[in-house]
Structures are given as C-alpha cells and as structure tokens.
Amino acid sequence: MADAPAQREKMLDAARVLRGNTRIVSDKGFRVIVTGKGGVGKTTITALLVHLFAREGFTTLAVDEDPQMNLPFALGIPWEERDRIVPLARDFDYVEEKTGARPGGGYGLMLSLNPDVSDVVERFGVRGPGGVNILVMGTVVQAATGCLCPENTLLESVIRYINLREGEVILMDTPAGVEHFGRTIARGFHHAILVTDTSFNAVQVAVHLAHLAKELGIPHIHLVINRVRSEDDVRKVREILGRSMDLFAGVHVLPYDEGLIRCEPDVRPLLGTGSPFIDRLRSLQKTLVRFGK
Ligand SMILES: Nc1ncnc2c1ncn2[C@@H]1O[C@H](COP(=O)(O)OP(=O)(O)O)[C@@H](O)[C@H]1O
Ligand SMILES: [Mg+2]
C-alpha cells in the first residue's frame, strides 16, 4: 500500500537514487504541460495533441497526473487494458518488481545513464493505439499543500530522469487546480498550455496559472479558449483578460464541437475529420513545434 510508512520510505529512497542518477543533459525534445480549471477540455486537448504528434512521427509520452486517470480512455486504451495499468504512485511493489531493484540492492542496475522515453515506458508505462506511450502517475491527492510526499517526489524524479531526444515530446495532463505548479513537477517544462472556456471563473484560473508558470520559468505560455460558439465569446474572454493577455505567447480559439460528445471518451474518431476543432489543434501543434524548447 502506497501509504504504509515502509512503502513511502522506499519511494523516497528510489526517488533519491533516480535524482542522484539524473545527469543534467539538456533536452533535445520538449515538454508540454496542459492545465486549467476542471472540465474545460484539458484531457481532450492533451489526448488529441498526443495523437497529432504521433502521426507526425514524434515519439510521444502522455503523462496522466490527474488522480482520476481518464487520459488513457481519451487516448483510446481499451477498458480491459486500462484496468491493467498500475499507476506509478499506487503500488510501489510493482515498480520494484518492474525494475528488479530492492533498496540497498543496486538500483543502479535498472538505470540507464542516458534514459529516453522508451526506457521509462518499458519500465513504468504502457503503449497505446497509434504508437502513443502513456505513463499514469496516480498522484495522491493530499490535503496538505505544497506536498513533498514521497509519491510526488517519485513522480517528479521519474519525469526529470528522462532525457528527451530529438523528436521526443512529453505532454502532461493535470488535475484541476494549481497544486502541480506548487510542487516542482512542472519545472523544466518548455510549454504551458492554459485551457479555459468562456466563463469568467475559468479565465481567472488560467490567468493565475499563467503567473505561476511564468514564475516557474516556463518559457512559452499559450492560452487556449475552448468551446467557443461565437465571436462574442472570444471578445468576452479578451475583455476579462485585459492586460493579462501579455502573459501569453499566443491565443488559440477552439470551437464548440458536437462530435466530441458523440465519441467521448475516445478522441481518435475525430482525428481524421476535417472539423475546425481539429484544424485549430493542428495549428497549435505546429506552433509548439515551431517554438521548440
Ligand atoms: N470544444 C469542445 N466542444 C464540445 N465539447 C467539448 C469540447 N472540449 C471538451 N469537450 C467536452 O467537455 C467535457 C470535459 O472535457 P475534459 O477534456 O474531460 O475536461 P478536463 O480534462 O479539463 O476536466 C468532455 O465531455 C469533452 O468531450
Ligand atoms: Mg481531465
């Protein structure tokens, strides 16, 4: 059990070892965090971007940081397989078994000195349809803020441990709220995609998150206005934003799309369609590539 003291001690131990073995080599690929208020479309957008990147030949790692763990469904992982996914933070015995390592018994053996996405996926993740790779974190929600609990420390260490090669991209879906910026997990990310719908509250959350992303040193911050039905919607959001618009490298407007409701949770049926929603996402994907890291 993840919350048993011995388990947690082991997690911290593994995290320390991973950290100790992480060489600061600069990423050649890039890391993208998708964040915003609950229900605004983060998981949908992350899943579609992951598939769009994979279709362009990128090696993708989709990271689900949301304890609700619905990114695998959105990516099109079948139910039976989804049940077999063991979140990194839930069962450290499984992680130990995968790595063949025991504390004090040579974690070094499991560690590649220059780990890439495939090393980490092989050990902790699963492969999904369309060749996408998925890492489910199963982050434990803690009442305490600024949580330095072993689970989060381990997750952060695993993510940091990866050295992104050219053509590799990490896209991380997050739970609602701002905690992931309170922890250090988003540090070292190159892009933050802040998703909002046209409601006042969601826009306020996006602005708050943009400030936090900036403080963390994330160089490229993009705003996505989702579920837009009219020009007035966009005008309203721009008015709420006011001077905060300056926080964003660009604004991407995604229209409301009935098709999403029909195919959810699996987003793949939308990929081949010429829907304006997908067109706009494709242009967001191209923007990410253009900015790079
Ligand atoms: N542009 C859109 N048009 C219509 N429905 C959308 C759109 N974007 C997202 N949705 C729907 O909104 C719901 C919430 O989306 P989701 O991606 O789960 O949000 P979050 O991850 O931010 O909580 C889902 O049912 C999804 O299909
Ligand atoms: Mg979600």
Image: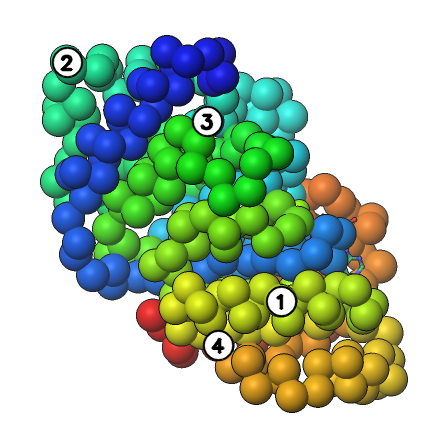
Comparing labels 4 and 3, the label whose residue is closer to the camera: 3
Q: Nearer the viewer, residue 67 or 268?
A: 67
Q: Which residue is mark 1?
A: 208
Mark 4 or mark 3: which comes first in sequence? Answer: 3
Q: Is residue 57 visible?
A: no
Amino acid on which disc 4 is placed: Thr
Q: Are marks 1 and 4 in contact (CB under 8 Å)?
A: no
Residue drawn at point x = 65 percent, y = 59 percent: 36
Residue pictured at 48% horizontal, 76% vertical: 287
Residue 260 vs 283, above or below: the answer is above
Distance Cα–Cα, label 1 vs label 3: 28 Å
Q: How many marks?
A: 4
* Image x and y of residue 269, in percent: 69, 51
Q: Secondary structure at mark 3?
A: loop
Q: Earlier in the sequence, mark 1 or mark 3?
A: 3
Task: Give the residue at mark 3.
Answer: 89
Asked whether the residues under the numbered discs 1 and 3 touch, taking CB atoms below 8 Å apart as contact, a structural biologist would say: no
Which residue is label 4 attached to?
Answer: 287
Q: Depth-wise, is mark 1 or mark 3 nearer the camera?
A: 1
Mark 4: which secondary structure? Answer: helix
Q: CA distance from mark 2 to mark 3?
A: 21 Å
Q: Is residue 279 above or below residue 216?
A: below
- SS at circle 2: loop
Residue on which disc 2 sits: 105
Of circles 4 and 2, the one toward us is 2
Left or right: 7 in relation to 266: left
The quadrant of the image that shows the C terminus is: bottom left
Q: Residue furthest front?
A: 144
Mark 4 and mark 2 lie on one chain; the one further toward the N terminus is 2
Amino acid type at mark 3: Ala
Question: Which quarter of the figure has residue 72?
Answer: top right
Q: CA distance from mark 1 to mark 4?
A: 23 Å
